[in-house]
Image: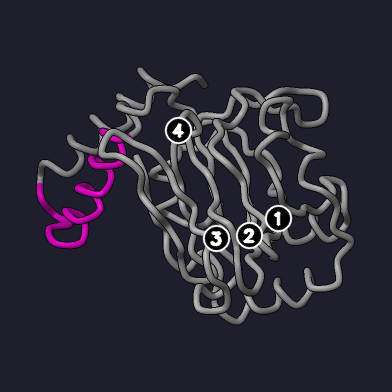
Amino acid sequence: MLLTIPGVLEASEAASFRQALEDADWISGNATAGYLSQRVKNNEQLREDHPLARKLGNRILDLLERNQTFVSAALPLKIVPPLFNRYQGGESYGPHIDGGVRPVGGHRVRTDLSATLFLSPPESYDGGELIVGDTAGERHFKLKAGDLLLYPATSVHRVAPVVRGARLAAFFWLQSMVRSAEQRAILFQLDNGLRALGRDAPDHPSLVELMGVYHNLIRQWSDS
């Protein structure tokens, strides 16, 4: 499932993120690339332990915890702290697949889903599309500042060269409570239907039964 979640950051807060990142200490993105990805990765990145990365990353996680669409679609169990990258001057990231497991502190996180939070307005740079492959072919994404794309970590994806301006983004991975992408899609569809029914017919007698079905499926399918 490829899902765009608009407005994770308000435009004003996205602008404050960009201002804070403008003078940050950027390093080569190869610092976190695997041995194959290093051949096709050409960008800049904040160190994982950079104080600014931690501060802005914690703010993103706080907002996502309260974002109903994100929680419903991802059903997050563990989230890798967000990282930050920058593309400019023709930099790009060729076709690759994200690693299946990411170490975080003393434990490991299975990467079921990848997420990119766009921080730069699309009109401020040329190129830089996030291109994700799925069963329908390649899909191109260049979202508004503050919008997030959630996509399967199993997909082949790439970032087109940025030929004007700079493209700033946060990115991270997460382990879902529900490993199966198909089951997550069913639960997301069911949850959306339940929310609509709760708005339109809050006293409908079937609402409680259907809510029970939803939670019983989570009990059956979740890892924890």
Of the two numbered discs 4 and 3 on the same chain, state the one appearing first in sequence. 3
Nearer to the camera, 99 or 211: 99
**CB-based contact (under 8 Å), mark 4 and mark 3:** no
Q: CA distance from mark 2 to mark 1?
A: 6 Å
Q: Is residue 47 above or below residue 15?
A: above
Disc 2: which residue: 169
Q: Are marks 2 and 1 in contact (CB under 8 Å)?
A: yes
Q: What amino acid is at disc 4?
A: Ser
Task: State the residue position of label 1.
Answer: 85
Query: Magenta span has 197?
Result: yes
Magenta stretch containing residue 112, yes or no? no
Residue 6 image point, x, y percent:
42, 65
Mark 1 neighbour density, 10 Å: few (under 14) some (14–19) many (20 or more): some
Between label 2 and label 3, give the one nearer the viewer: 3
Labelled pair 4, 2 in contact (Cβ < 8 Å):
no
Q: Residue at x 76, y 31 (%)?
A: 104
Q: Earlier in the sequence, mark 1 or mark 4?
A: 1
Instruction: Give the position of the N terminus as an image quadrant.
Output: top left
Secondary element type, mark 3: loop
Q: Earlier in the sequence, mark 2 or mark 1?
A: 1
What label sits on residue 155 in the rendered view?
A: 4
Amino acid type at mark 1: Asn
SS label for mark 1: strand
